[in-house]
């Protein structure tokens, strides 16, 4: 197979160069040239390909009217791991490409090996392409996970052309590439893991998946900041992007869908790491709630929404004397939003923390990005400052604006029903989230509807 010619393309202006240069000859930008495979059409040389009429290069394509296109439901194949199926939107889609990233050692390879084994046992032909481990190492890990008689086919290979040839010959239902940063193409001279190699290899694997119907899962490395390594275009190529979250020192892991063309985004799956691999957690709220025998100051439970799943999470706050330079520190919550909430608390509720250190933590290592945590954070801070705990069975949620108003949270009724199901009895929520007059009340739950943060503080004082 003849080696194709490579060119260098500027990521800023799109200009090309026959060799790598530090400075783009077209726009003058520095360090923007990346290697690409030049693919001139048949009968056209590299010199005249851009001067050839477009109709001669590719011909014309047939158009279709959107209303006349027949839409059909996407067929899914369950992986046999309920929490993973939840994140994927129901299972693996034929021809779908999934990118999963996470910190080293967090459990990406473990989860995927368990998934392909379950699919193989269900009659789906599965292939595990290992670029970071030998076949013996993969087999050792499978024994450790209790997969002694696994029939999953393993291919220790990092050359793209051999991988695609093997996939084309065996046509598995699902193939795992672990990891995309180790795969390289002979058509490029750059090293494996470079921007050009990652993008080119991912593009070829994506095209193969769409043409053959094989579902492909790409494992990606992450940067020091926790983002997926490689070009951002990699996330645009694939159908689904999953992130593995959690502290490696904790036994619990979260898999979050950041992008999903076949399901809901921001859906999460909760797993516990055991000696036999990752096990799904059916009731994740139990992870994020404390085991205090009695209520303690500075602790408030809120109901957050992760995708379609309402979860109860404990918010803890500690307010202490801070001296001349008080600190504001949050774990699992936005630090800038914490500073804003402290200002609102002082201006509209008369609760001053100007000379106090304020520490806020979301228990269990979960990250809460939605503003519905505002009310719970402010009540937890007030509880710690006063040294008085909230009543037993107390929950709160709602967004707080700069004017002190308490705004509704999406799908409030589902949040309240989840809290009632787990035995909570008192709730402070935005007025718009309270059950309407004439509607069915939530059994066992006393709801206090508030419109402003001052009202919420008055309700808490009455409950003391």
Image (tube, grey):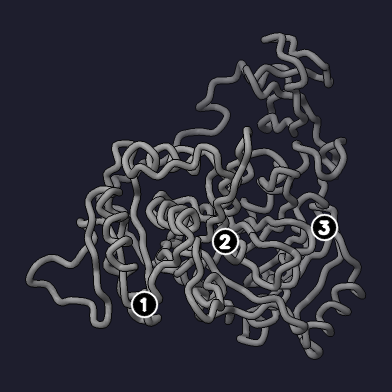
- Give the residue at mark 3: 162
Q: 10 Å neighbourhood of mark 2: few (<14), some, or many (≥20)?
A: many
* Image position of 252 with respect to 244: above or below: below
| Placement of 190 over or under 301, stated as above or below | above
In the picture of the structure, the residue carrying the numbered disc 1 is 424
Callout 2: SS: loop
Residue lying at 57% horizontally and 71% vertically, measured from the top left:
270
The quarter holding residue 401 reads top left
Please state which of residues 337 and 317 is positioned toward the viewer in this rendering.
Answer: 317
Where 59 sits versus 10, above or below?
below
Report if the CB atoms under discs 1 and 2 are less than 8 Å apart: no
Q: Which residue is mark 2?
A: 366
Residue at mark 2 to residue at mark 3: CA–CA distance: 41 Å
Q: Residue at x 44, y 41 (%)?
A: 352
Residue 293: percent from the left, percent from the top?
53, 81
Labelled disc at residue 3: none
Q: Quadrant of the C terminus?
A: bottom left
Quarter holding the N terminus? top right
Q: Quadrant of residue 322?
A: top right
Task: Describe the element under mark 1 as helix, strand or loop.
Answer: loop
Mark 2 vs mark 3: which is more N-terminal?
A: 3
Which one is in front, 209 or 183? 183
In the depicted view, which residue is nearer to us: 376 or 1?
A: 376
Q: Viewed as shown, does residue 378 lie left or right of 85?
A: left
Element type at mark 3: helix
Q: How many marks?
A: 3
Where does the image place residue 21, in percent across and percent down from the top left? Answer: 83, 17
- Residue 117, given in percent of the width and then of the height, sits at 70, 81
CA separation in Å, label 3 and label 1 = 58 Å
Is 195 located above or below residue 432 in the figure? above
Label 1 CA crowd tier, 10 Å (few <14, some 14–19, many 20+):
some
């Amino acid at each position: 197979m003849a080696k194709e010619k490579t060119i260098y393309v500027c990521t800023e202006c799109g200009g090309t160069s026959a060799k790598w240069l530090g400075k783009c000859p077209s726009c003058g930008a520095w360090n923007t040239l990346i290697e690409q495979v030049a693919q001139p059409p048949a009968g056209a040389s590299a010199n005249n390909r851009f001067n050839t009429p477009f109709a001669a290069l590719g011909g014309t394509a047939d158009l279709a009217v959107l209303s006349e296109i027949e839409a059909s439901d996407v067929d899914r194949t369950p992986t046999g791991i309920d929490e993973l199926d939840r994140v994927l939107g129901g299972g693996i889609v034929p021809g779908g490409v999934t990118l999963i990233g996470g910190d080293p050692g967090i459990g990406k390879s473990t989860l995927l090996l368990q998934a392909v084994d379950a699919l193989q046992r269900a009659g789906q032909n599965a292939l595990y392409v290992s670029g970071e481990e030998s076949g013996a190492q993969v087999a050792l890990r499978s024994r450790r996970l209790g997969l002694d008689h696994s029939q999953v086919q393993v291919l220790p290979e990092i050359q793209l052309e051999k991988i695609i040839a093997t996939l084309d010959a065996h046509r598995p239902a699902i193939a795992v590439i672990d990891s995309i940063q180790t795969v390289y193409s002979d058509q490029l001279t750059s090293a494996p893991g470079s921007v050009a190699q990652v993008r080119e290899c991912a593009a070829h694997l994506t095209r193969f998946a769409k043409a053959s119907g094989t579902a492909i899962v790409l494992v990606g490395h992450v940067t020091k900041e926790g983002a997926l390594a490689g070009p951002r275009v990699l996330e645009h190529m694939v159908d689904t992007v999953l992130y593995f979250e959690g502290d490696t020192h904790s036994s619990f892991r979260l898999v979050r869908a950041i992008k999903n063309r076949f399901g809901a985004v921001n859906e999460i799956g909760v797993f516990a790491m055991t000696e036999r691999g990752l096990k799904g957690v059916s009731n994740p709220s139990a992870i994020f709630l404390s085991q205090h025998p009695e209520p303690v100051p500075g602790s408030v439970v809120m109901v957050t929404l992760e995708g379609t799943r309402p979860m109860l999470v404990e918010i803890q706050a500690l307010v202490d004397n801070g001296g001349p330079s008080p600190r504001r520190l949050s774990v699992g919550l936005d630090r800038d939003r914490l500073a804003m909430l402290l200002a609102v608390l002082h201006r509209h509720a008369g609760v001053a923390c100007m000379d106090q250190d304020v520490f806020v933590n979301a228990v269990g290592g979960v990250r809460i990005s939605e503003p519905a945590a505002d009310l719970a954070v402010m009540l937890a801070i007030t509880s710690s400052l006063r040294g008085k705990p909230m009543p037993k069975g107390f929950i709160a949620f709602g967004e707080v604006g700069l004017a002190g108003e308490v705004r509704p949270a999406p799908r409030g009724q589902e949040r309240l029903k989840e809290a009632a199901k787990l035995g909570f009895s008192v709730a402070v929520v935005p007025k718009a989230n309270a059950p309407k007059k004439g509607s069915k009340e939530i059994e066992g739950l006393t709801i206090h509807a508030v419109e402003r943060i001052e009202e919420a503080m008055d309700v808490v004082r009455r409950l003391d």
